[in-house]
Amino acid sequence: MQARFDRLVELASRSVARRSSRRGFLGTFAMAITGVAALPLLPVRRGSVAEAAELPAKPTGAAGKEAGAPTKPKIVTDPSSCEYWKYCAIDGFLCACCGGTSTTCPPGTEPSPITWIGTCQNPTDGRDYLVSYNDCCGRTTCGACTCVRNEGEKPMYRMSLNNDVNWCMANDNPNYHCSVSVILGVAEK
Protein backbone atom coordinates (compact mmCIF):
# COMPACT_ATOMS: atom_id res chain seq x y z
CA MET A 1 0.00 0.00 0.00
CA GLN A 2 2.81 2.41 0.98
CA ALA A 3 4.74 1.67 -2.24
CA ARG A 4 1.63 2.26 -4.36
CA PHE A 5 1.02 5.67 -2.69
CA ASP A 6 4.68 6.64 -3.11
CA ARG A 7 4.53 5.70 -6.81
CA LEU A 8 1.33 7.75 -7.32
CA VAL A 9 2.87 10.85 -5.64
CA GLU A 10 6.06 10.43 -7.69
CA LEU A 11 4.11 10.24 -11.00
CA ALA A 12 2.04 13.31 -10.10
CA SER A 13 5.15 15.26 -9.09
CA ARG A 14 6.97 14.38 -12.30
CA SER A 15 3.93 15.34 -14.37
CA VAL A 16 3.76 18.77 -12.71
CA ALA A 17 7.54 19.20 -13.09
CA ARG A 18 7.31 18.52 -16.85
CA ARG A 19 4.61 21.16 -17.34
CA SER A 20 5.99 23.92 -15.12
CA SER A 21 9.22 25.61 -14.05
CA ARG A 22 10.51 26.99 -10.77
CA ARG A 23 10.62 30.47 -12.25
CA GLY A 24 6.97 30.22 -13.34
CA PHE A 25 5.95 29.00 -9.89
CA LEU A 26 7.86 31.82 -8.17
CA GLY A 27 6.31 34.40 -10.51
CA THR A 28 2.78 33.16 -9.81
CA PHE A 29 3.48 33.01 -6.09
CA ALA A 30 4.87 36.58 -6.10
CA MET A 31 1.80 37.90 -7.98
CA ALA A 32 -0.50 36.22 -5.44
CA ILE A 33 1.41 37.74 -2.50
CA THR A 34 1.35 41.18 -4.14
CA GLY A 35 -2.40 40.92 -4.74
CA VAL A 36 -3.06 39.97 -1.14
CA ALA A 37 -0.84 42.83 0.11
CA ALA A 38 -2.68 45.36 -2.11
CA LEU A 39 -6.13 44.29 -0.91
CA PRO A 40 -6.28 46.82 1.99
CA LEU A 41 -5.61 49.66 -0.48
CA LEU A 42 -8.91 49.14 -2.29
CA PRO A 43 -11.42 51.94 -1.66
CA VAL A 44 -14.16 51.26 0.87
CA ARG A 45 -17.21 53.47 1.21
CA ARG A 46 -17.87 53.99 4.88
CA GLY A 47 -19.69 57.31 4.50
CA SER A 48 -23.16 55.79 4.31
CA VAL A 49 -22.61 54.03 7.63
CA ALA A 50 -21.49 57.27 9.25
CA GLU A 51 -24.39 59.22 7.73
CA ALA A 52 -26.89 56.67 9.02
CA ALA A 53 -25.38 56.87 12.51
CA GLU A 54 -25.62 60.68 12.54
CA LEU A 55 -29.27 60.90 11.46
CA PRO A 56 -31.42 62.27 14.27
CA ALA A 57 -34.24 60.16 15.61
CA LYS A 58 -37.61 61.04 14.10
CA PRO A 59 -39.95 62.67 16.60
CA THR A 60 -43.18 60.83 17.31
CA GLY A 61 -46.56 62.16 18.27
CA ALA A 62 -48.80 61.07 21.14
CA ALA A 63 -50.15 58.07 19.20
CA GLY A 64 -46.63 56.86 18.34
CA LYS A 65 -46.78 58.17 14.74
CA GLU A 66 -44.20 60.43 13.15
CA ALA A 67 -44.78 64.12 13.75
CA GLY A 68 -46.15 65.90 10.70
CA ALA A 69 -44.06 68.97 9.79
CA PRO A 70 -40.30 68.70 9.35
CA THR A 71 -38.32 71.26 11.32
CA LYS A 72 -35.52 73.36 9.87
CA PRO A 73 -32.10 72.91 11.44
CA LYS A 74 -31.06 75.80 13.66
CA ILE A 75 -28.46 78.06 12.01
CA VAL A 76 -25.53 78.62 14.38
CA THR A 77 -23.94 82.08 14.07
CA ASP A 78 -21.60 81.93 17.08
CA PRO A 79 -17.94 81.52 15.92
CA SER A 80 -17.04 79.97 19.29
CA SER A 81 -19.45 77.07 18.65
CA CYS A 82 -18.22 73.92 16.93
CA GLU A 83 -21.47 73.83 14.91
CA TYR A 84 -20.61 77.12 13.18
CA TRP A 85 -20.85 76.45 9.43
CA LYS A 86 -17.22 77.40 8.58
CA TYR A 87 -15.90 74.63 10.82
CA CYS A 88 -17.13 71.71 8.70
CA ALA A 89 -13.60 70.27 8.31
CA ILE A 90 -11.79 71.58 11.37
CA ASP A 91 -9.94 69.45 13.91
CA GLY A 92 -8.50 71.18 16.97
CA PHE A 93 -9.21 73.99 19.39
CA LEU A 94 -11.13 77.05 18.17
CA CYS A 95 -9.05 80.24 18.33
CA ALA A 96 -12.30 82.15 18.93
CA CYS A 97 -12.21 80.62 22.45
CA CYS A 98 -8.46 81.06 22.94
CA GLY A 99 -7.96 84.83 22.68
CA GLY A 100 -8.23 85.17 18.90
CA THR A 101 -11.14 85.19 16.47
CA SER A 102 -12.43 82.69 13.92
CA THR A 103 -10.04 84.24 11.36
CA THR A 104 -7.08 85.58 13.40
CA CYS A 105 -4.57 83.90 15.69
CA PRO A 106 -4.33 84.96 19.33
CA PRO A 107 -1.49 87.29 20.40
CA GLY A 108 1.81 85.46 20.82
CA THR A 109 1.06 82.92 18.09
CA GLU A 110 1.59 82.91 14.35
CA PRO A 111 -0.30 81.09 11.60
CA SER A 112 1.31 78.11 9.95
CA PRO A 113 2.27 78.81 6.31
CA ILE A 114 0.82 75.44 5.26
CA THR A 115 -2.87 74.62 5.71
CA TRP A 116 -5.61 72.18 4.86
CA ILE A 117 -8.65 73.05 2.78
CA GLY A 118 -12.34 72.25 3.15
CA THR A 119 -15.54 73.11 1.32
CA CYS A 120 -18.39 74.18 3.61
CA GLN A 121 -21.95 75.18 2.77
CA ASN A 122 -23.24 78.39 4.33
CA PRO A 123 -26.81 77.63 5.44
CA THR A 124 -27.92 81.26 5.16
CA ASP A 125 -27.23 81.60 1.42
CA GLY A 126 -26.94 77.91 0.42
CA ARG A 127 -23.59 78.46 -1.35
CA ASP A 128 -20.44 76.39 -0.94
CA TYR A 129 -17.26 78.17 0.15
CA LEU A 130 -13.60 77.13 0.04
CA VAL A 131 -12.26 77.41 3.58
CA SER A 132 -8.59 77.36 4.58
CA TYR A 133 -7.88 76.01 8.05
CA ASN A 134 -4.73 77.42 9.63
CA ASP A 135 -3.06 76.19 12.79
CA CYS A 136 -1.83 78.96 15.10
CA CYS A 137 1.58 78.04 16.46
CA GLY A 138 4.09 79.17 19.04
CA ARG A 139 2.35 78.58 22.38
CA THR A 140 1.21 75.48 24.22
CA THR A 141 -2.14 73.93 23.37
CA CYS A 142 -5.11 76.14 24.23
CA GLY A 143 -7.34 73.30 25.45
CA ALA A 144 -10.65 75.21 25.10
CA CYS A 145 -13.47 74.59 22.63
CA THR A 146 -12.37 71.28 21.15
CA CYS A 147 -13.91 70.86 17.70
CA VAL A 148 -13.46 67.73 15.60
CA ARG A 149 -15.47 67.73 12.39
CA ASN A 150 -14.13 65.58 9.58
CA GLU A 151 -16.55 66.35 6.77
CA GLY A 152 -14.73 65.80 3.47
CA GLU A 153 -11.49 64.67 5.09
CA LYS A 154 -9.38 62.53 2.77
CA PRO A 155 -7.03 59.69 3.70
CA MET A 156 -3.49 60.55 4.70
CA TYR A 157 -2.18 60.17 1.14
CA ARG A 158 -3.93 63.51 0.37
CA MET A 159 -2.24 65.57 3.10
CA SER A 160 -3.66 68.91 1.95
CA LEU A 161 -7.17 67.60 2.63
CA ASN A 162 -6.40 65.86 5.93
CA ASN A 163 -6.86 67.60 9.26
CA ASP A 164 -4.93 65.14 11.45
CA VAL A 165 -1.53 66.68 10.71
CA ASN A 166 0.28 69.12 12.99
CA TRP A 167 0.67 71.88 10.42
CA CYS A 168 2.91 73.83 12.84
CA MET A 169 5.81 71.63 11.75
CA ALA A 170 6.73 74.36 9.22
CA ASN A 171 7.13 77.05 11.91
CA ASP A 172 10.19 77.90 13.99
CA ASN A 173 8.18 77.00 17.11
CA PRO A 174 6.17 73.87 16.20
CA ASN A 175 3.87 73.98 19.28
CA TYR A 176 0.19 73.87 18.25
CA HIS A 177 -2.13 76.32 20.04
CA CYS A 178 -5.46 76.53 18.14
CA SER A 179 -7.01 76.68 14.64
CA VAL A 180 -8.72 79.39 12.57
CA SER A 181 -10.82 79.22 9.40
CA VAL A 182 -10.45 81.72 6.57
CA ILE A 183 -12.86 81.87 3.64
CA LEU A 184 -10.92 81.81 0.36
CA GLY A 185 -13.88 82.27 -1.96
CA VAL A 186 -17.01 80.74 -3.41
CA ALA A 187 -16.60 77.17 -4.64
CA GLU A 188 -17.42 76.83 -8.34
CA LYS A 189 -19.27 73.74 -9.41
Image (cartoon, helix red, strand yellow):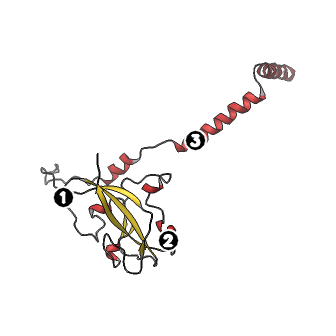
Q: Nearer the viewer, mark 3 or mark 2?
A: 2
Report helix, strand or loop for mark 2.
loop
Task: Say left or right for 100 vs 71.
Answer: right
* Residue under the image location 49 percent in, 74 percent down: 175
Quarter in which the N terminus is drawn: top right
Are the residues at dot 1 and dot 3 in contact (C-beta closer than 8 Å)? no
Which residue matches tag 2? 171
Tag 2: amino acid:
Asn
Q: Earlier in the sequence, mark 3 or mark 2?
A: 3
Q: Earlier in the sequence, mark 2 or mark 1?
A: 1
Tag 1: amino acid:
Thr
* Residue 90 visible (yes or no): no
Quarter in which the C terminus is drawn: top left
* Residue under the image location 12 percent in, 51 percent down: 69
Report helix, strand or loop for mark 3.
helix
Which residue matches tag 3? 38
Which residue matches tag 1? 124
